Amino acid sequence: MKGSRGFTLLEMIVATTILGVAVVGLMSGLAGITRNAARLREYCRAAQLARLRMNDLLSEYKLPRDQMLTGGFDPQITGGTTAGWTARYTIADVSPARIVNDFALDRVDLEVWWMSGQQRRTIKLEGYRRRVLTAEDTIEVRK
């Protein structure tokens, strides 16, 4: 029949195969996007926790210098992820004379860690703050 139109069986098999390959490629792409979104969500949460902890550390003037400070985060604010932090205060810059009521610059190094599956991931921040030298600071120089 010369006037009949339609698809042959071979054309249908080829079209179905092409459609199947396209769907498989699309599904694997969506799986990769989902994994990346979960990783980015973890990273954004950790960055927010790091900013909050850094703000707390920069506002606390009574913490010891040159000692490692550590702590953990409440699982309620980490989304159930195990996470913690380590920090260290050091003197970044100070006048050589070290006169009481003069200014000094403290450096705060902060590392926030969290568990992503079995892998430990980290974010490192550093911050600076200005403070007034106390009598204790001038005693440290005399020793």
Image: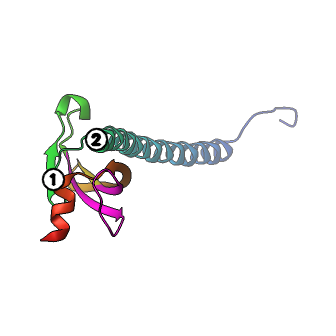
- Residue stretch rendered in magenta on the structure: 84-109
Q: Which mark is drawn over residue 103?
A: none
The answer to whether residue 66 shows anywhere in this view is no
Q: Vertical placement of 125 versus 58: above or below?
A: below
The chief SS type of the magenta part is strand
> x%, y% of residue 66?
18, 62
> x%, y% of residue 131?
33, 48
Mark nearer the N terminus (2 vs 1): 2
Identified at 19% across, 46% down, the residue is: 84
User: Mark 2, mark 1: which one is toward the viewer?
Assistant: 1
The extreme right residue here reads 3
Report which residue position mark 1 lands on: 64
Per the image, is 88 magenta?
Answer: yes
Quarter assignment of residue 38: top left
> Badge 2: how crowded within 10 Å, few (<14), some, or many (20+)?
some
> x%, y% of residue 83?
20, 44
Identified at 17% across, 43% down, the residue is: 82
**Image quadrant containing the C terminus:** bottom left
The amino acid type, in three-letter code, at marker 2 is Arg
Q: Secondary structure at mark 1?
A: loop
The amino acid type, in three-letter code, at marker 1 is Pro
Q: Vertical placement of 116 versus 5: above or below?
A: below
Report which residue position mark 2 lands on: 53
Look at the image and name its color scheme. Answer: rainbow
The answer to whether residue 21 shows anywhere in this view is yes
